[in-house]
Amino acid sequence: MAKTKQQKSLTKWTKQKWRTPSGKKSSVTGEVYAPSRTISKLKSTKKGKAKLAAANKKKRAATKKGKQHAKHGLHKGKKR
């Protein structure tokens, strides 16, 4: 039986290596989790670094308010 489009997407998503920009736990640093490839791309440009810093700031503010999830904008345009 062939996998559906959603199943294929989930398989691809789970194979990605997700991490924080520093490589430390998010519970310690308050940083966002994102795929390694995305973090590398963002860290390579000045604009990307600013976007990552803004996302981390939003994540820390949401965590401080007791929220588990933050709308930080790194995944904008992606269907979730």
Image (spheres, rainbow, N blue to C red):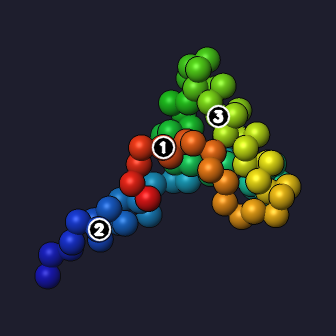
Which of the two labelled residues, at mark 3 and mark 2, occupies the earlier sequence position? 2
Dot 3: what SS?
helix
Name which residue type carries label 2. Answer: Gln
Residue 53, position as x, y percentages in the image: 71, 32
Residue 1, position as x, y percentages in the image: 14, 82
Dot 2: what SS?
helix
The residue closer to the viewer here, 27 or 58, is 58
Q: Which residue in the structure is indicated by mark 3?
A: 52
The answer to whether residue 31 is left or right of residue 44 is right
- Contact between labelled residues 1 and 3, with CB atoms less than 8 Å apart: no
In the rendered image, the residue lying farthest to the left is 1
In the rendered image, the residue lying farthest to the top is 46
Badge 2 local density, few (<14 within 10 Å), some, or many (20+)?
few
Give residue 26's mark.
Answer: none
Q: CA distance from mark 2 to mark 1?
A: 19 Å
Which of the two labelled residues, at mark 2 and mark 1, occupies the earlier sequence position? 2
Q: Is residue 75 above or below residue 66?
A: above
**Which picture quadrant has residue 15?**
bottom left
Q: Quadrant of the C terminus?
A: bottom left
Q: CA distance from mark 3 to mark 1?
A: 13 Å
Which of the two labelled residues, at mark 3 and mark 1, occupies the earlier sequence position? 3
The answer to whether residue 7 is left or right of residue 33 is left
Q: Which residue in the structure is indicated by mark 2?
A: 6
Name which residue type carries label 3. Answer: Leu
Badge 1 local density, few (<14 within 10 Å), some, or many (20+)?
few
Name which residue type carries label 1. Answer: Lys
Residue 3, position as x, y percentages in the image: 21, 73
In the rendered image, the residue lying farthest to the bottom is 1
Q: Which residue in the structure is indicated by mark 1?
A: 76
Q: Is residue 1 above or below residue 21?
A: below
